[in-house]
Amino acid sequence: ISSHPTQQKIVYPSSENTFSTIHCSKQYTIKLGCTTHEPIISATYNPEGNRIAIIYDKTGFSIYNPKTNFCYNIPITKYPRKVIATAFHPCHPIIAVLFDNNTL
């Protein structure tokens, strides 16, 4: 679960292969994000709230753009490892990825 940095909404894995956002205004509105072929472990907003990093169970992660509804898959193929966590840089368009062998 991740909260949007500037708006009253959160993103969360709503089923095994889907994540959704909830707008926490006067009326709660649930918007379906993207559905994937792999189980979703987590989803996290970047500092501006215009991208979401999605970690999959086995194949890596994706960057999702909620405005265009485009999901860019980033497969981890050279050194297949399980992605444990992602973190966006607060000022630059950089994302760090932590793997199961404690490497970035």
Image (cartoon, rainbow, N blue to C red):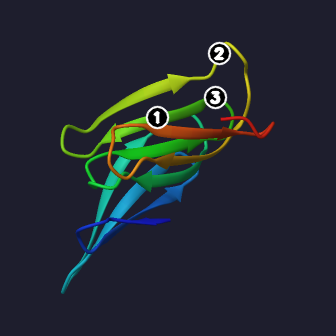
The residue that label 2 is drawn on is 77
The residue that label 3 is drawn on is 59
Above or below — where is 26 with respect to 93?
below
Identified at 73% across, 21% down, the residue is 80
Label number found at residue 42: none
Q: Position of residue 31 (x, y in %)?
A: 29, 59
Q: Position of residue 26 (x, y in %)?
A: 18, 87
Q: Position of residue 20 (x, y in %)?
A: 39, 58
Above or below — where is 9 with respect to 101?
below
- Label 1: which secondary element: strand
The residue that label 1 is drawn on is 62
Which is nearer the eye, 71 or 95? 95
Identified at 60% across, 31% down, the residue is 60
Residue that extends furthest to the top in the rendered view of this protein: 78
Above or below — where is 45 with respect to 76?
below
Are circles 3 and 1 on residues that touch, CB within 8 Å?
Answer: no
